[in-house]
Amino acid sequence: MIVLHYTGMQTGEAAIARLRDAEARVSAHYVVEEDGRVFRLISEERRAWHAGKGSWQGETDCNAASIGIEIVNPGHEFGYRAFPEAQVQAVIALVSDIRERWTVPDWRIIGHSDLAPTRKEDPGELFPWKDLARAGHGLWFEPAPERIAALGPPLKPGDEGLGVHVLQSGLRRLGYGIEITGRYDELTAAVVTAFQRHWRQASVDGVADGETRARLVGLLQLAQAESVTGVI
């Protein structure tokens, strides 16, 4: 996997200092500054302690199965802001470079919040996942309006039944660590919110409206198509 983070600290210098501090017990393979500079802190073949507790597609030791990229941004706590173009282009180039050395399927290029939806928000709803996917890295899908309308009213916390079961099943198939209970509980809302931060960035509210569900269906179809062709 490739896991993208934001640093969530006030400066890039402070983030790098923390990542280099053995007592902090946190690390990452790369840091990408706002001006596009890239710092390699750990060799790619070595484990870095960036992911923490979480899972993706059944993998629970994500640190052992991923390369972590920290993107300098103060995050939601210190003044979350858009990622500068130079920084975005540097991330795209870095991901491309990593994929030349490692087999990383598109559906295993994720955010920290995807593998840890109850704990993390990064890199957040301002990160341009669409631009990354347009460059050939990661999944992206935008549904037609009629496809959205066909899915009916939103699913929301407190709902129960077949619709929630189908939603949870789809999120689990994509990779999220979610139990299929048929109940729209707190965990389901957290997972939907994480999904929206990545793939439905205009509405990050934990409510699975028609567009959220249409995007999920489309992403699953893309992932399946890649699997059939042997890419995944």
Image (spheres, rainbow, N blue to C red):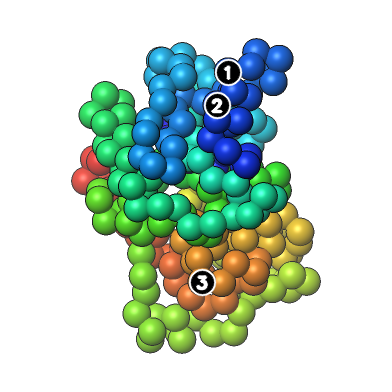
- Which disc number belongs to residue 20? 1
Disc with the residue nearer the chain's start (3 vs 1): 1
User: Toward the viewer: 109 or 229?
Assistant: 109
Q: Is residue 179 left or right of residue 202?
A: right
Q: Is residue 74 left or right of residue 228?
A: right
Decide if residue 145 is in sight here: yes
Q: Position of residue 169 (x, y in %)?
A: 56, 57
How far across and down, in percent of the image, does residue 118 sit?
Answer: 70, 48
- Callouts 2 and 1 close, C-beta under 8 Å: yes
Element type at marker 2? helix
Label 2 and label 1: CA atoms lie apart by 6 Å
Q: Is residue 101 above or below residue 212?
A: above
Q: Quadrant of residue 188?
A: bottom right
Question: Which mark is drawn over residue 91?
Answer: none
Crowding near the residue tagged with mark 3, few <14, some 14–19, many ≥20 C-alpha atoms within 10 Å: few
Judge the density around disc 1: few (<14), some (14-19), many (≥20) Cα neighbours within 10 Å: some
Instruction: Tell me the quarter of the image containing the C terminus.
Output: top left
Which amino acid is tagged 2? Ile
Residue at left offset 61%, top offset 61%: 192
The residue that mark 3 highlights is: 202
Q: Are marks 3 and 1 in contact (CB under 8 Å)?
A: no
Relative to 23, residue 190 above or below = below
Number of callouts: 3
Residue 167: x, y in percent? 57, 64
Q: Residue at x 67, y 32 (%)?
A: 53
Quadrant for the N terminus, please. Answer: top left
Residue where numbered disc 2 is placed:
16
Q: Quadrant of residue 98?
A: top left
Q: CA distance from mark 3 to mark 2?
A: 31 Å
Q: Gap in Å between the C-alphas at discs 3 and 1?
A: 35 Å
Q: Amino acid at mark 3?
A: Ala
